[in-house]
Amino acid sequence: MTLIQSAKLNRHDPYAYLKDVLTRLPTQKNNAIDELLPHNWKPAIPNKV
């Protein structure tokens, strides 16, 4: 399964997910990488309604 498919299955916008993850990845601590997986991911800046 690809990251795009997994993001869709977790009801995330794939573009927003990848953009956020690729932005955060260089500064993410090794022990916190799990937070960036689609089933754990929370956007750095949540969408305002």
Image (spheres, rainbow, N blue to C red):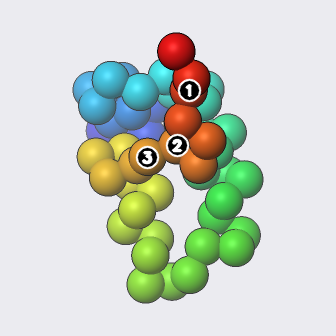
> Please, what is the three-letter code of the amino acid marked with disc 3?
Lys
Nearer to us in this view, 29 or 5: 29
- Does residue 48 appear left or right of residue 24 in this picture? left
Q: What residue lies at 66% left-to-right and 59% top-to-bottom?
A: 24
Amino acid type assigned to the residue bearing label 2 in the image: Pro
Residue under label 1, please give it: 47
Q: Along the horizontal axis of the image, is 24 left or right of 5?
A: right
Mark 3 surroundings: few (<14), some (14-19) or many (≥20) residues within 10 A: some
Which of the two residues, 19 or 45, is positioned nearer the viewer here?
45
The answer to whether 19 is drawn above or below residue 31 in the figure is above
First along the sequence among labels 1 and 3: 3
The answer to whether 49 appears left or right of 3 in the picture is right
Q: Quarter of the image holding residue 16?
A: top right
Cα separation between marks 2 and 1: 8 Å
Q: At 39% from the left edge and 33% from the top edge, which residue is drawn? A: 7
Q: Which percent across, then down, holds residue 19?
A: 67, 39
Cβ–Cβ under 8 Å for marks 3 and 2: yes
Circles 1 and 3 in contact, beta carbons < 8 Å: no
Q: CA distance from mark 1 to mark 3?
A: 11 Å
Closer to the eye: label 2 or 1: 1
> Which numbered tag is attached to residue 22?
none
Element under disc 2: loop
Q: Which residue is mark 2?
A: 43
Question: Residue at 51% across / 83% down in the picture?
Answer: 30
Q: Nearer the viewer, residue 17 or 44?
A: 44
Identify residue for label 3.
Answer: 42
Q: Residues within 10 Å of mark 2 (few under 14, many from 20)?
A: few
